[in-house]
Amino acid sequence: MPEEFAGYEAVSKFDLLIQSDTCANDLFSFGDRVAGTIDADISRLFVDLDRQYTSVPPAIDGVLKKTTLYGKPVFRDNLFPDEIAISNVLRRYWVPFHDAVKKIIDTANLKLIIECHTMLAVGPTVSRDPGKPRPIILLENIINRDGDAVATCSPELTANLLEHLKKAFAGVDDTVVEKFAIAAEPSPGFIHRQYGTGPIPMVRLSLSRALYLNDKYFSYDYMRVDELRIRHLGDLLWSAIEKFYNRNFQ
């Protein structure tokens, strides 16, 4: 939580854990094996980097949330930050993140961009798929640009990446839906729309938290996730991405 909002919040530490891209920074920590990695430590409830900075309340799912994904108030009654506080927080967290993204895209010799997320096993109340079970891995390669569906990565490349992920995650637990999928609808995220129209192929990759936020790998008493499990899943992700890259870009 940004220190500027301390005392305003109505959410618990558990809310902050569950409502974030939980463990994404660790799962997708590929270090110097990639040209550049950008992550964040601020909860999306307070600064959602995947929303346009102008999308402020009364926007329901904007850059700053009034409610959690399950409808719980984020801020205490009558303590919602004013425009000055919101502007300061955006300048401190939102702007540097996107400046860093632009710099890497402009200066690094990139051949592929992967936008990395984790997702709840079932669509929450505030989502485009409320109450619906989700796959273990979801890839997105379509955005909406001026009313038209535009591919940010070719269907062939996206399908090939999914095949490598299928092989890497072949031994994971089953779900009640298809385990691996490519979204048919355009991605709703600002990051994908903003940076996915250039010459560099870009894919949005989401991993289900059902793989590690469960009774086997997560302690509710201490709010800790099994580090070995996270490391193992991270190794599987990197193995698939590396083989995909070597096959298609080397």
Image: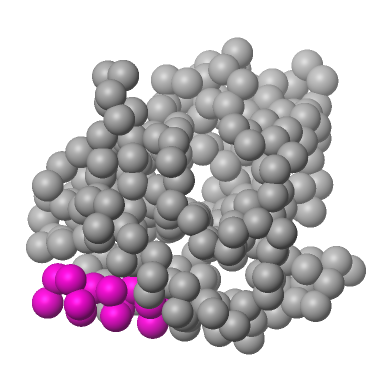
Q: Does the magenta stretch include residue 129?
A: no
Colour logic? one colour
Q: Main secondary structure of the magenta part?
A: helix
At 23% across and 73% down in the image, what residue appears? Answer: 245
Quadrant the N terminus occupies: top right
Quadrant the C terminus occupies: bottom left
In the rendered image, residue 20, in percent from the top left (x then y), is placed at 62, 50
Closer to the camera, 193 or 57? 193
Q: Is residue 162 above or below residue 229?
A: above
Closer to the camera, 42 or 244? 244
At 28% across and 24% down in the image, what residue appears? Answer: 148
At 33% across and 40% down in the image, what residue appears? Answer: 142
Relative to 120, is 78 on the left or the right?
right
Q: How many labels does the image show?
A: 0
In the rendered image, residue 147, in percent from the top left (x then y), is placed at 31, 19
Q: Is residue 249 above or below residue 201?
A: below
In the rendered image, residue 201, in percent from the top left (x then y), is placed at 21, 53
**Whether residue 46 is visible:** yes
Closer to the camera, 51 or 235? 235
Question: Can you name the residue that lies furthest to the right here?
Answer: 221
Q: Residues in magenta? A: 237-250
